[in-house]
Amino acid sequence: MRRSFLFVITFFFAAVTYAQEITTLRIDPTTAMGGSASQLIENVSFTVLESTPESVFGSIEQLVVTPEYYIILDRSTNAVLIFDKAGKYHAKIKARAVNSGNNYYMNSFSYDKFNQLIRLPDGKEAFCFDTDGKFIKKINTYSYGYDMLNIAKGKTAGHSYGADRRNKDSIAYQVAIMDEQGISQKHLPYNFKYAPIENRDMLYSNHSTFYPTDDTAAYFVRPYDFNVYYLSAHTFYPVYRFVFPMSNTLPRDFPTDSSLNGKRIACVEKNKTFYYNLDGIFKMGNNLFFRPCSYSGRNDGYVYNLATKHLIALDKITADERTHFLFITDSRVGGVDFANHNFLATDSTSFYTSYSSLVLFQQKEATADKKPVYPPALASYFQDAKNRKGNPVIIKVTFKAEM
């Protein structure tokens, strides 16, 4: 039987005309293939994060990878922790360093890679710390500080959305480019009071809305819109349009139906097969990584090869000698980190995710009959049973150029 597709009308915030050609990607997740790790993965490495009384934390909510450090947000301890690339604890930024009343909640941070500064948002400002955890300065974020990304040297992209019937009738913008002089570019205008979807109806994933493509550009995504936008300091346009099967697609009038005001999140929760957002948008060569988000209980990541049109489900990659018989995502073994956060970060060659130590030990014990050969650091880690309660472990995955 032929499968039907339906695309949501996505420009529900403003009518915008784009001259650039959009690449339409028709994706049917039921056709996604798998494969062995040796077929699809070039290399995997595991970094054990040092567990000391000062450095112990719960889980990795956000990760930034620099040439020298792993910078980690842990909401359970309300802190940003910094480890070197060998996993040794280096520094910590506590909530009290930002707010002396200790009532500050660290929900996110951004990293200024050009000045090596960790930026913690607080209203219209951000507190900036160096990678030793030392406070350096405050900067103005114009209320865009809670989701920011360097887009070029001296240029930062920020996302904010605050439509509410209690607001004044005025025009606001979802995306802004900021520099030391102020806001230099604005994109995606909407009415601060009368936009069809209010802020209370916006359903985000645990990821940022920005995904860097290189030092001078990024992809941008937003709820209920299955376009992926290309953003630089001077350009903004949709580059990919995802089309999913009808069973996964929001109704055409979902963004504009006034009867859904205040009920859109409940609607998505009830209709668990509907995709409400995309996240984990990363491109390496012809491989485009993405994850459609739903309430189905399955939050699998996928890889679509733009040249071969092959679709691969990360959840179907089988562990083998290449991964020491350990799965690259914890969702295969009952973990929740990958389901909640997908890949946490990427650099020019590799992807980063994490495991809880408990789940990693459980995997090790379940695959003992395979006689895996572990690298020295991982073997030493497994030899000490106390590490079962230690910090999460970072997994670095390098995929093959063609999948």
Image (cartoon, helix red, strand yellow):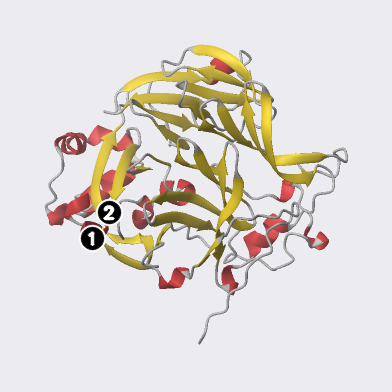
SS for callout 1: helix
Q: Nearer the viewer, mark 1 or mark 2?
A: 2
Rate crowding at label 1 as few (under 14), some (14 to 19) or many (20 or more) other CA atoms within 10 Å.
Answer: some
Check the image and report above or below for 93 versus 184.
above
The Cα–Cα distance between marks 1 and 2, rounded to whole angstroms, is 8 Å
How far from the left and from the top, in percent, is residue 111?
49, 28
Instruction: Return the disc, 1 or 2, that comes first in the chain's sequence.
Output: 1
Task: Find residue 183 and report its horizontal and vertical position in percent.
Answer: 68, 29
Q: Quadrant of residue 53?
A: top left
Name which residue lies at 52% across and 84% down.
2
Which residue is labeled 1 in the image?
Answer: 39
Q: What residue is shown at x 84% (from left), y 48% (from top)?
A: 194
Classify residue 80 as left or right of residue 47. Answer: right
Which quarter of the figure has residue 346?
Answer: top left
Q: Amino acid at mark 2?
A: Lys
Report the residue marked by disc 2. Answer: 400
Question: What's the residue type where badge 1 is placed?
Answer: Gln
How far from the left and from the top, in percent, is residue 50? Answer: 30, 27
Q: Determine which quarter of the picture holds residue 139.
A: top right
Is label 1 in contact with label 2 (beta carbons under 8 Å)?
A: yes
Residue 207 seen in render: no
- Residue 129 visible in rendering: yes
Quarter of the image with the C terminus is bottom left
Q: Is residue 397 above or below residue 133?
A: below
305 to the left or right of 139: left
Give the residue drawn at x 57%, y 68%.
248
* SS of the residue under disc 2: loop
